[in-house]
Amino acid sequence: MTDALAEMLAEHDDWCTVERGLAENSLLAYRRDLKRYETFLRSRGLTDPGAIDESTVHAYVTYLESLTDDDGQRLLAPSSVARAVVAVRSFHRFCAHEGLVASDPSDEVGAPRVAQGIPKALDEDEVERLLGSVSGDSPLAQRDRALLELLYGTGIRISEAVGLDLDDLDLDDAMVRVLGKGGKERVVPIGRSARLALTAYLRDGRLALRPTRVRKAADADAVFLNARGGRISRQACWQIVQRAAERVALEERCSPHVLRHSCATHMLDHGADLRVVQELLGHASISTTQVYTKVSPARLRAVYEAAHPRAKKARPKTTGGPGATAA
């Protein structure tokens, strides 16, 4: 028999899926975190969300932080605990907003502080080496070159690139329509290098990869195809980037997400507006984009020297000598 806790967790899951439109990976993470929370609550005999108070949520955070492996090492990193707290807050906030409980017991519960990581962007010379590492005009080489140019040229996520269909591309106007996190759609410009690489791939390489009979209808219009003619996978896309990075000794520093970081960093270095970069990357919050402003001290210095009236002004020379009059 289903109790109140199970019912509300199920309603919250439906809300995250339908109303919030969370991506599948985000939904799976929420479900894992809330399943652990449910187990913790039931171990304390709590099956009614209305009976959960702030001390219970605090106790859960402490419990997560105390979990250890067989070697006595912490089982969950602070970032994992913080993510779990986000899921718990989402659940209780939903219950309160829907009027299912009187108040939100998680409202004042803090999550562990997580050090903000600075994106490890490649410099522009390294990106040039990477993009030039794919040689030849075979169908797979054309595909790999187009994929690398698109990832760096637009800053789109690997999942967004994999999900592209032919009608998402408008090469005449040099634009691509992207379906981002939460099902949010945005339009991103395509640079000249990426457009040339895509044009060559679509004209020759993709036609050679396309099978005479498509096994999956969803693959028929996919932009990037694998050697068997199906839609390329995230794993295959990651491997393409890694193989290119290995050729130029960047395998320890490069991934599809690093290309996204590099795109944002280089645009900001060349004077792009932060809000524009936010829109291009599909960030819901400007604070997510702001992390890229910490990457380049050189850019900070350049902007400061260009904007501050006394940044480059020479100090007045001291005149006079033995006979100078004191001020």
Image: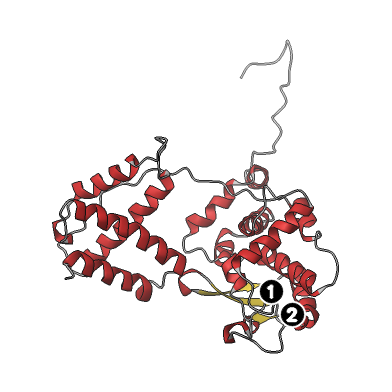
Task: Give the camera-side residue of 291 and 86.
Answer: 86
Q: Is residue 300 above or below residue 47?
A: above
User: In terms of secondary structure, where does tag 2 sit?
Assistant: helix
Q: Identify the residue at image location x=37%, y=43%.
A: 112
Name the quadrant containing residue 244: bottom right
Residue at image coords 31%, 46%? 110
Q: Is residue 27 visible?
A: yes
- Residue 270 drawn at (x, y percent): 69, 55
Which is nearer the eye, 40 or 134? 40
Are the residues flagged by discs 1 and 2 in contact, CB closer than 8 Å?
yes
Residue 243 drawn at (x, y percent) = 73, 58
The location of residue 190, given as percent across then percent down, is: 69, 72
Circle 2: residue type: Leu
What's the distance in space between the residues labelled 1 and 2, CA to CA? 7 Å
Pick the quarter of the image with the N terminus: bottom left
Quarter location, residue 255 = bottom right
Quadrant in which residue 141 is drawn: bottom right
The amino acid type, in three-letter code, at marker 1 is Asn
Residue drawn at x 20%, y 52% as measured from the top left: 43
Q: Residue farthest to the bottom?
A: 213
Is 186 positioned to the left or the right of 34 in the image?
Answer: right
Q: Which of 45 and 200 is in front in this view?
A: 45
Look at mark 1 in the image and give the residue it sits on. 226
54 vs 162, nearest the viewer: 162
- Dot placed on the residue nearer the N-terminal end, 1 or 2: 2
Q: Position of residue 310 (x, y in %)?
A: 64, 38
Q: Name the residue under label 2.
A: 209
Secondary structure under the numbered disc 1 in the rendered image: loop
**Is 113 rendered above or below residue 33?**
above
Does 219 appear above or below 119? below
Q: Give the image's coloring scheme.
A: secondary structure
